[in-house]
Image (tube, helix red, strand yellow):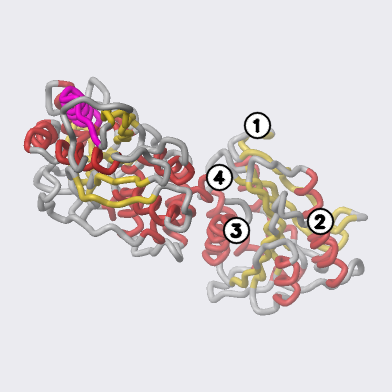
Amino acid sequence: ATAIEIRGCSGVIDLGVTVTPALAPEVEADANTFNATKPAANGRCVNVVLTTDASADEAQQLPTQQINPPALWIPDSSLWARDVAVRTASNRLAPQLDMLGSLAASPLVLAAPVSLAHQIGWPAKAPSWSSVASGTLPTAIGNPATTTEGLAGTLMLESAMHSPAAAPSPALVALLVKLGHSAVSDIGAEFTDDGVNGHGVAFTASEQAVIQANQEQGATKFAAMIPKDGTLVFDYPLVRAVSGGEVAGTATAAAEFETVLRSASTTSMLTAGGFRMADSTIQGARAYPPSQDVTTLVRTWLALSLNARFLTVVDVSGSMNGTVNPNGETKAQTVRDATMIGLSEFPDTTEIGLWVFASQLAPPEDWREVVPIGLLGEPMDGVTRRVALQRASAVLPSMVHGNTALYATALAAYRDVLAGYDPFKVNAVVLMTDGFNDVNGPDLASTVATLRSWSDPRRPLPLFTIGIGPAADMNALRQLAAATNGRAYQVTTATDIVNVFLDVMVQRTDCRC
């Protein structure tokens, strides 16, 4: 048969349709209407089997779903569908996707209780993504790896900061670190009966979700504000997932159900539910960025969201009393300032410890543990470890003396972190020095060889080295880092050092993600 037949049939075509929760009521109504007509295709009875699933979850499952994948998928954004299409294009066993066009549209907005929106100046004044990025407008952002509100919102923040995903700026990385441990996993939970969301701040949502929340509460308790610097649009594409093992007649059945989904009655249901028509003109709508940029951003987010376990090792040899930048600070003071700034960028769930090193610092050793590795938010001697690290960093300039025991310290620090390795966190050693090894002990070749023998891809532990100023032995630092799949940096200011720590966070993708 070339079309649906309303007559006798043998066998069944279960037409799998997976839909985003936002469109589920309308699509379920269509499925019930369609099934009630007792359709058939290729002599088989057709029955639409509807599944509701978050778009991000289905995007993860579909590429490997070889048994009974849905014939039709309706995510809330083609951002997810494009990602799946890229991942399945070269896999003949995976369903191949065909984009059939949008069913509806809804812009991404900054939602807020009306009282808060009025404080912002809405409706006469619209907020901006720039104000969110700068912290002027506190905003709860959805998790970009699991919610479309979070993914689209984070892409807009990236655009507002003029920072491409392929090479994120330190400012963007710092913002993602802060957002990573406070991201909202359930945007629906931000809408409450009394109109005051749990965070007491703005939050990312679709315009339709705001309209629906107000409809359910019987009053306009939430405002849907389209940022003045543009936005992305949820486009609800209909996606045909073609499987090699699908039953004959599936294509015909899918085409006929598509006709129902695009009918005038369905459009009426969607607009009544707060959606805009698929071809609506939305002021400030931006084009979706390339798929690779989206993938890179999510990868960076996931890396930055992982809990970390760092040991920071600081050179306090005599040469650290020298200056290296125009403001006249000593190198030890520069490290102190950088540590003070950097500690504010990490959440309480980060584990950090501090060592210092110089010749005969703690005889017979040339290094000393100042603050043991542990959670920044954990109590320690009457204060948190974060405060203990700040206090220890403040006195670094007063500890300067002696020579540079670079190689012995690198081995001792690496061995220590390796002994306490946590497979559920990203482990790393960050070593800072302004000079070169000038004490007795292992030479460079043996140190590199030992580090290489200890380095295990199954338990990644990169050593990141930071050379402070032009006198740092960058050749040695590069070899030490390379032996562990780490990286070497050369810096002159406190800001440089902070940016290195932020870059280290991104570089962890090579080690773990």
Gap between marks 1 and 2, in whole Å? 37 Å
Q: Is residue 114 visible?
A: no
- First-in-chain label (3 vs 4): 4
Residue 91 coordinates in the image, percent (x, y)? 48, 54
**What residue is disc 3 on?**
510
Asked if the residue at tag 3 contacts the one at tag 2, i.e. Cβ–Cβ closer than 8 Å, the answer is no
Q: Which residues are magenta?
A: 24-41
Helix, strand or loop at label 4? It is loop
Q: Earlier in the sequence, mark 1 or mark 2?
A: 1
Are the residues tagged 3 and 4 within 8 Å (C-beta)? Answer: no
Q: Is residue 248 above or below residue 344?
A: above
Indicate which disc, 3 or 1, sits on the residue closer to the N terminus. Answer: 1
* Earlier residue among tags 2 and 3: 2
The disc, 1 or 4, on the residue closer to the chain's N-terminal end is 4
Residue that badge 4 annotates:
306
Q: Which mark is residue 382?
A: 1
- Report how far apart the C-alphas of labels 1 and 4 lie in the structure: 28 Å
Label 4 – label 2 distance at C-alpha: 23 Å
Q: Name which residue lies at 62% across and 34% down.
A: 378
Residue 252 is situated, as x and y percent measured from the top left of the image, at: 24, 42
Residue at image mark 2? 454
Which amino acid, by three-letter code, is at mark 2? Answer: Trp
In the depicted structure, whether residue 355 falls above or below residue 332: above
